[in-house]
Amino acid sequence: MTLTAPWFFHPSSDMEVMMAFCSACGTQMADNSAFCPKCGKASDTGISPVPASTSTSAASGSLPMAENVAGMLAYFTIIPAILFLLIEPFNRNRFVRFHAFQCLFTCGALIVLQIVLSIFSHILPFLMFGIWSLLGLAELALWILLVIKAYQHEMFKLPIVGDMAEKQAGA
């Protein structure tokens, strides 16, 4: 069963923004850049303009919102990540699927880590207070990093869960 996006996700015609992407690797490029920042290909032969609200992969089709915004929103709890994997235009987009899966796998890993640390907190309660504080700050910093990287249209992979997400997303 596939779901379609609600009416409020569909953009108006004034929201279309043209962006340049490298034809070799698909990385977004500035309009005045001479070379691709990722693969180094010259921009005079390797730039192809692509609307911001469409996907860079041919099989994805048109999205109701820019894929970098959808990738960023996938990190706001697990609810948007699950919805993006269920709703029709988003579940075919490789970039959005990657960030949704990375969010889900990261949340799962953090839950397991918190369960293990809660077991240790019964054994060493005074030592664990500082570790719980540092873990909270690290989770906040990780969340901010992932949101910013997704908004910058980067497929930033975390060490273990990033590979799993890439495999699940078909990237």
Image: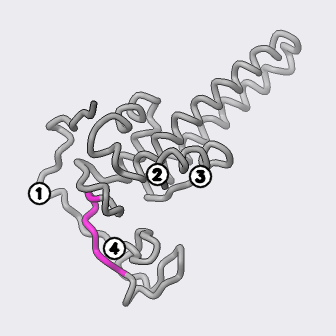
Q: Residues within 10 Å of mark 1 (few under 14, many from 20)?
A: few
Q: Secondary structure at mark 1?
A: helix
Q: Secondary structure at mark 3?
A: loop
Q: Is residue 20 magenta?
A: no
Q: The residue under label 3 is which amino acid type?
A: Lys
Q: The residue under label 4 is which amino acid type?
A: Ala
For label 1, the residue is: 13
The foreground one among 127 and 20 is 20
Q: The residue under label 2 is which amino acid type?
A: Ala
Instruction: Please report the bounds of the magenta region as a residue range.
Output: 47-54
Q: Give the answer, above or below, for where 116 lies relative to 53.
A: above
Give the distance between the C-alpha atoms of the residues marked 3 and 4, in whole angstroms: 23 Å
Give the distance between the C-alpha atoms of the residues marked 1 and 4, in whole angstroms: 19 Å
Judge from the rendering whether residue 37 lies leftward or rightward of residue 164; answer left or right. left
For label 4, the residue is: 20
Q: Give the answer, above or below, for where 157 lies relative to 88.
A: below
Query: Residue 14, image x and y in percent?
Result: 13, 58
Q: Give the answer, above or below, for where 162 lies relative to 81.
A: below
Q: The residue under label 1 is which amino acid type?
A: Ser
Judge from the rendering whether residue 107 lies leftward or rightward of residue 43; answer left or right. right
Give the distance between the C-alpha atoms of the residues marked 1 and 3, in whole angstroms: 33 Å
- The numbered disc on residue 157 is 3
Q: Secondary structure at mark 4?
A: strand
Query: Residue 148, image x and y in percent?
Result: 49, 51
